[in-house]
Amino acid sequence: MKIRFALALTALLPLMVACKAQDGTADTTAPAQTPAAAETTAPAETAAPAEQSAPAASEAGSEAAPATDAAANTPVPAPARPVGPEPVAGTDYVAIEGGQPFQPATGKIEVTEIFGYVCPACARFQPQIASWKAGLPADVNFVYVPAVFGGPWDNYARAFYAAQTLGVQEKTHDALYAAIHLDHTLKGELGMDTPEDIAGFYAKHGVPAKTFVDTMGSFSVSANVNRAKQFAQRSKITGTPSLIVNGKYLVKGKSYDDMLRIADHLIARERAANAK
């Protein structure tokens, strides 16, 4: 499924797609590719650029001596240096006043992606962010945060937290994007999928439909959805996909590759600050 999903989304690159909130607060567009190798589209928080090639292999890091894995008694390689120039405030990222991680974890640097299952740009970004996420150093905690922009966005935010509660979120993440944007078995932003419609998808992945609907309507899921909405508002999110590093920096960038490059630098900056 993951290979099929990535290949199929690559085939969609020439299409114009947009992610727009029901209340007009988000309008992020993934433009068609041009013959030029580099993209020059608007920054990420107002526009989600066209998908590029696979992200750089380098992750953020420092020159600190390698740590030791006590269990295996073997050295743990230090994270590689981030590539490219240092990011510039206001151009490459926006500092979030009083920003805090969404899900703080001791000794971890948090990266959150605010996304929407109904957002075509997020669907196109997913194969790339998944690859980058898989290569993150052990001191980085990656957290998905669903956008709550009204209309179909809200039901899918509830679905995300219901799936998380029921232990199936990770294994269904790519498949849900595919159901909406490739298979069209769900309508996504083109129509209001009901909780029952969405539960039908999860029933194919082993969760009884009634159990899923009940979980979507639970108090704990409602609390998580409200918390996600407040986090996005505090972080001044206007569109998806958006990356936030340690709650402090909203990443901009001219392309998906550029967003990840900037995130690598900001992770390294946080690591250096934590080491002082």
Image (spheres, rainbow, N blue to C red):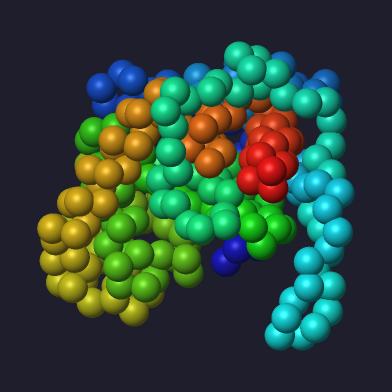
Toward which corner of the image does residue 237 lie, by quadrant? top left
What percent of the width, then of the height, locates residue 188? 34, 43
Residue ID at (33%, 28%): 233
**Residue 48 to residue 162: above or below:** above
Taking 276 as reference, is 106 left or right?
left
What percent of the width, then of the height, locates residue 139? 64, 58
> Can see residue 20?
no
Q: Residue furthest front?
A: 276
- Work out whether residue 38 or residue 196 is closer to the camera in this orientation and state it: 38
What percent of the width, then of the height, locates residue 215? 19, 65
**Residue 215 to residue 273: above or below:** below
**Residue 176 to residue 12: above or below:** below
- Work out whether residue 31 or residue 256 is closer to the camera in this orientation and state it: 256
Residue ID at (22%, 35%): 151
Residue ID at (30%, 58%): 161
Taking 80 as reference, is 144 left or right?
left
> Can see residue 154?
yes
- The quadrant of the picture occupied by the C terminus is top right
- The quadrant of the picture occupied by the N terminus is bottom right
Taking 42 as reference, is 241 left or right?
left
- Work out whether residue 188 or residue 259 is closer to the camera in this orientation and state it: 259
Residue ID at (55%, 30%): 249
Toward which corner of the image does residue 32 lie, by quadrant? top right
**Residue 259 to residue 271: above or below:** above
Count of marks overlaid on the render: 0
